[in-house]
Image (cartoon, grey):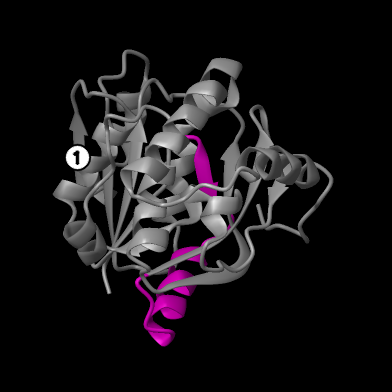
């Protein structure tokens, strides 16, 4: 099966090379790598060009935000499975894509996900938070459960059947897409209990204004998909995040 891995970037010169190497060093060779740049003005494109012979598609043009860029990548893709690895994230080791493909095939899954660690912006070896996702249970989204979106691998035909990212949402379109796929349409999804992505801290959702906007967009997402949201949702989420600060995964490969 071909995996289309999509990286979106904007002025990511400090981190994108590690992301690119993380994909190109995978031991699973049937990967179509697509990089979508939003018109970077730093040296991001110079770094990308160093690896152009190993990248299937590169586009650089203004976009309407990160989710519009992701949708461009999905439209360009020709793979059976879509994976999105942002320009400040890396896979934990070179076997991740192969393990996910085998897991999806052996269990006839539409999608799969795993665990994630947040790492320090300036020190990739320093884990600051461990997101142990756990198995999905029907109705879990309504009570504040969320799977780590950078670990989400999904068959392209699911996107074609149920739609791409809603780029009218600025912060929570990844949440809305997974809510729509998993909770509303009940695709067959599996959990691989392994840390598969290291994610640097930061992003719109991690500042106060982004948190407020993200919560409003989450409420809109439930309404849009006609799914009930529990009044416990916004209590459970911060408690879960606080517990993640004290949890630690096992030994990670660099």
Q: Secondary structure at mark 1?
A: helix
Q: Kindly identify which residue carries mark 1.
A: 72
Is residue 207 among the parts visible in the rendering?
yes
Is residue 127 among the parts visible in the rendering?
no
Tell me the residue at 51%/47% (across/down). Answer: 229
For residue 166, side relative to residue 205 (left or right): left
The span picked out in magenta is 87-110
Q: Is residue 99 magenta?
A: yes
Tell me the residue at 41%/44% (across/down). Answer: 222
- Furthest-right residue in view? 246
Tell me the residue at 79%/46% (across/down). Answer: 243
- Furthest-bottom residue in view? 106
Q: Is residue 180 magenta?
A: no
Query: Which quadrant holds residue 207?
Result: top right
On screen, 25 above or below 36?
below
Q: Residues within 10 Å of mark 1 (few under 14, many from 20)?
A: some
User: Residue 117 location in percent, x, y?
Assistant: 66, 48
Q: Nearer the viewer, residue 207 or 251?
A: 207
Q: Nearer the viewer, residue 200 or 225?
A: 225
User: Residue 127 location in percent, x, y?
Assistant: 74, 42
Tell me the residue at 35%/63% (across/down). Answer: 154
User: Residue 220 location in percent, x, y?
Assistant: 39, 35
For residue 190, side relative to residue 153 (left or right): right
User: Residue 205 location in percent, x, y?
Assistant: 53, 28
Quarter of the image with the N terminus is bottom left
Q: Nearer the viewer, residue 141 or 190?
A: 141
């Amino acid at each position: 099966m071909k995996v289309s891995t999509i990286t979106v970037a904007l002025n990511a010169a400090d981190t994108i090379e590690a992301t690119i190497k993380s994909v190109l060093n995978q031991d699973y060779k049937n990967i179509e790598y697509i990089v979508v740049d939003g018109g970077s003005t730093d040296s991001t494109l110079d770094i990308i060009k160093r690896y152009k012979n190993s990248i299937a598609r590169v586009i650089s043009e203004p976009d309407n935000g990160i989710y519009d860029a992701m949708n461009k990548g999905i439209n360009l893709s020709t793979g059976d499975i879509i994976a999105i690895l942002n320009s400040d994230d890396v896979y934990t080791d070179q076997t991740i894509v192969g393990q996910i493909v085998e897991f999806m095939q052996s269990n006839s899954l539409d999608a799969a996900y795993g665990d994630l660690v947040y790492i320090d912006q300036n020190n990739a070896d320093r884990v600051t938070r461990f997101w142990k996702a756990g198995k999905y249970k029907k109705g879990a989204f309504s009570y504040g459960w969320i799977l780590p979106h950078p670990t989400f691998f999904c068959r392209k035909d699911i996107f074609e059947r149920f739609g791409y990212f809603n780029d009218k949402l600025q912060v929570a379109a990844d949440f809305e897409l997974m809510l729509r796929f998993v909770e509303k349409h009940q695709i067959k999804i599996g959990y691989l209990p392994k840390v598969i992505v290291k994610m640097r801290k930061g992003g719109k959702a991690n500042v106060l204004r982004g948190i407020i906007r993200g919560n409003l967009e989450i409420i809109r997402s439930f309404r849009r998909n006609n799914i009930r949201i529990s009044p416990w949702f916004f209590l459970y989420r911060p408690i879960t995040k606080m517990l993640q600060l004290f949890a630690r995964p096992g030994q990670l490969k660099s």
